[in-house]
Image (cartoon, rainbow, N blue to C red):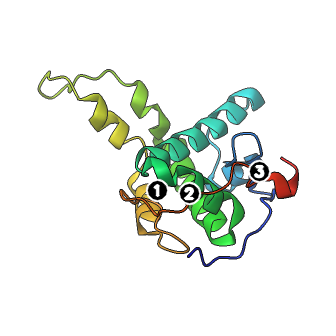
Amino acid sequence: MLNANIIKPYDSPTMTYDSVKHRYILTTVALNSVGNTWKDDQAFIERRLKQISNVVYNWIYSHTHTSNIALVEFVLACTEKGRQVIEEALTYQLEADVENGYNDISKILPINPANGQVIKQIDIKENAICIETRNVLEDCIDPIKLIFAGSYGITLPNNRYSYWSY
């Protein structure tokens, strides 16, 4: 059913793989390629790049049927197409954050200044990623559709990463 070549997750100049959290994180090379306007503080930059990864992956998992999360995680980590999709999504999110602090949207005061009404938490969470990132994730259908409310009916073993010793 999953028609994709399985690869070992790997680091590149623009992304590193966190084998504990099973997710990719952009590097300073990726940041510099979009035009780094952040302060020259390495700890801040690393924290911000991890935050971008967390925001995007959490958005994916919150829009994925619970029975599919392990499969989606595996596809993003262990297929070249999944890796390309997550790199593109993370890069768009990085661009939006560098340009206007997009990842801080969840930290805003939940009051609409135009009308004084409370903004629902679900609406803030829904808009945690920029539209370009959302389009990449929603349009991805190869090797699987990432954002899918139904179950794929595929159960992966708990040791799915053991081939690579983690």
Task: Establish if 93 lies above or below 83.
Answer: above
Determine the residue positioned at 69% across, 40% down: 21
Task: Establish if 38 lies above or below 31.
Answer: above
Q: Which residue is mark 2?
A: 72
For discs 3 and 2, the disc positioned in front in the rendered view: 2
In terms of sequence position, does the residue under pointer 3 or pointer 1 come before the other?
3
Q: Which label number is shown at residue 133?
A: 1
**Horizontal placement of 153 versus 113: left or right?**
right
Q: CA distance from mark 3 to mark 1?
A: 19 Å
Given the image, on which type of amino acid does mark 3 rest?
Thr
Q: Are marks 3 and 2 in contact (CB under 8 Å)?
A: no
Q: Find numbered disc 1 in the image and state the secondary structure of the residue it sits on.
A: helix
Q: Quadrant of residue 38?
A: top right
Determine the residue positioned at 41% across, 56% down: 134
Q: Which residue is mark 3?
A: 16
| Percent of width and height locating residue 98 | 55, 43
Determine the residue positioned at 32% across, 34% down: 124
